[in-house]
Image (cartoon, rainbow, N blue to C red):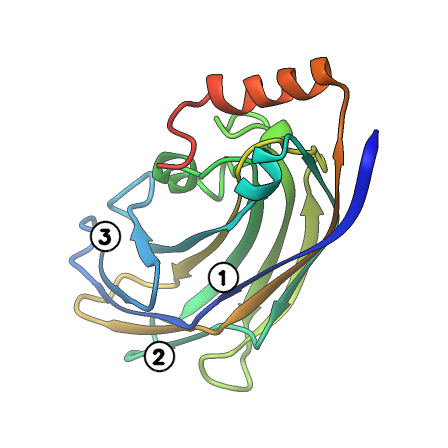
Amino acid sequence: MDDVQPRQLLKQVGIGSALCTLLTPGLGVDVVATGQNWVSIPPENPGVNQVILANRSYIDLAGYSKAELTTFIQSVAVQHMRDPLAITSNAAAPVEVIWSYDFLTTRKIRDSELAGLISNAPGYHGNTLDLMEMIYGEHRTYALNANIDGTFITSDSDVLGSGNPTAGDRVHWTRVYYFASGGAIVDDAISITIYPANLVCQAVTGKEKDLIWVERLRRAYTQDPGRNE
């Protein structure tokens, strides 16, 4: 590989919040999300008391792609300002567990690929976003802190990803939070806050042999023509 150059890729995501109302049992949750690029994703089973909040952003690699360079991401650090908060209006129906995910992918993740997050997360067998499209990911499980209202302790964490290089013009960063309520009390309100985070990637770019680069570029754009929509 020729013309190897070190690169640093940076991205920041701002604060997100949501006001959620538990509806009559069997009707799910009404969610109003606020914050730049933060949206609510309807869960796979809309009748359950679950909330999925997502933020999609990307790092522009068009300059490298135009110069026919491949980007190899060598390390990824997601810097969390602090753990999320979830305050309920009724202590009998707290948010008992939160799952958080950060995905760095070669294409944008669709709503349908996030809706079944707990049973079938992106990057794992069965999801339509496969391992080769998952450059890097990490996830945490937060359990309710019995000592401080609305706060959580980290009970599990792990990473995933193939580290696959990309010849595309974007690398996508998706933040996802899944909140599960412990009750189904009608008209209870849940106030959720997700704090800012930074993405810091150390990478290199290089010029691969023509056949390798063209095939990598072909896979990036022909297998998923709507990858950036």
Contact, mark 1 vs mark 2 (Cβ under 8 Å): no
Residue 202 at x, y = what percent? Answer: 74, 54
Disc 1, SS: strand
**Label 3, residues with CA under 10 Å away: few <14, some 14-19, many ≥20:** many
Q: Where is the C terminus found, in terms of image quarters?
A: top left
Q: Secondary structure at mark 3?
A: loop
- Based on the displayed image, in which of its 4 quarters is residue 134 positioned? top right
Which of the two labelled residues, at mark 3 and mark 2, occupies the earlier sequence position? Answer: 3
Identify residue type, mark 2. Ala
Residue at (76%, 25%) from the top-left corner?
208
Foreground residue, 190 or 221?
221
Which image quadrant is residue 30 in? bottom left
Reading the image, the residue beneath label 2 is 91
Q: Which residue is mark 1?
A: 98
Q: From the viewer's side, name the closer residue of 15 and 190.
A: 15
* Vertical arrangement, residue 175 with respect to residue 145, above or below: above
Residue 155: give x, y in percent of width and height: 65, 63
Q: Residue 203: percent from the left, percent from the top? A: 74, 48
Circles 1 and 3 in contact, beta carbons < 8 Å = no
Please name the amino acid that badge 3 sits on.
Answer: Gly
Contact check, label 3 and label 2, Cβ < 8 Å: no
Determine the CA span between mark 1 and mark 3.
17 Å
Q: Is residue 165 left or right of residue 178?
A: right
Residues at marks 3 and 2, CA–CA distance in whole angstroms:
19 Å
Identify residue for label 3: 28
Q: Quadrant of the N terminus?
A: top right
For marks 1 and 3, the one nearer the N-term is: 3
